[in-house]
Image (tube, rainbow, N blue to C red):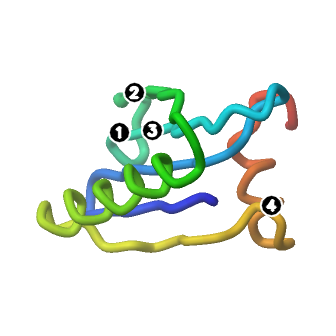
């Protein structure tokens, strides 16, 4: 699952996915729109439920900061696969 929140100047993007070992990864990227300023953090969740709990917490935090949700896709859908391709450093 990929979820993105934005304000006029900033963004936060969360990607919840399984790695090749079956572990659940919670990735969070943030920054200023149109610049290279920002960061990326990955967290290993105990299971899918914990990763989804973190996603819910992130939604609450971003909403309280005035961010609006602009994207929520499942990576198994065509839109989700396109979003994953945009995140990949391997695809041009």
Q: Is mark 1 on a helix, strand or loop?
A: strand
Distance of label 2 from label 1 (alpha carbons): 6 Å
From the viewer's perspective, tell me whether residue 5 is left or right of residue 44: left
10 Å crowding of disc 2: few (<14), some (14-19), many (20+): few
Task: Give the x, y percent position of residue 26.
Answer: 52, 39
Counting residues from the start of the chain, the first of labels 3 and 2 encountered is: 3
Q: What element carries label 2?
A: strand
Residues at discs 3 and 1 in contact (Cβ within 8 Å): yes
- Which residue is pictured at 76% across the width and 32% down the height? 19
Distance of label 4 from label 2 (alpha carbons): 22 Å
- Which residue is pictured at 38% across the width and 50% down the height? 54
- Which residue is pictured at 36% across the width and 52% down the height? 11
Q: Name the residue under label 3.
A: 29
Task: Give the x, y percent position of residue 76.
Answer: 83, 65
Most foreground residue, 42 or 36: 42
Residues at discs 3 and 2 in contact (Cβ within 8 Å): yes
Q: Name the residue under label 2.
A: 39
From the viewer's perspective, tell me whether residue 14 is left or right of residue 66: right
Q: Name the residue under label 1.
A: 31
Task: Give the x, y percent position of residue 13.
Answer: 47, 50
Whether residue 34 is situated above or below residue 59 in the rendered picture: above
């Amino acid at each position: 699952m990929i979820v993105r929140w934005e304000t006029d100047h900033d963004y936060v993007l969360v990607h919840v996915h399984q790695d090749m070992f079956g572990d659940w990864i919670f990735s969070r990227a943030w920054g200023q729109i149109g610049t290279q300023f920002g960061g990326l953090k990955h967290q290993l969740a105990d299971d899918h439920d914990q990763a989804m709990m973190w996603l819910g917490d992130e939604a609450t935090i971003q909403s309280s900061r005035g961010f609006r949700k602009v994207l929520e896709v499942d990576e198994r859908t065509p839109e989700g696969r396109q979003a994953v391709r945009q995140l990949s450093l391997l695809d041009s």
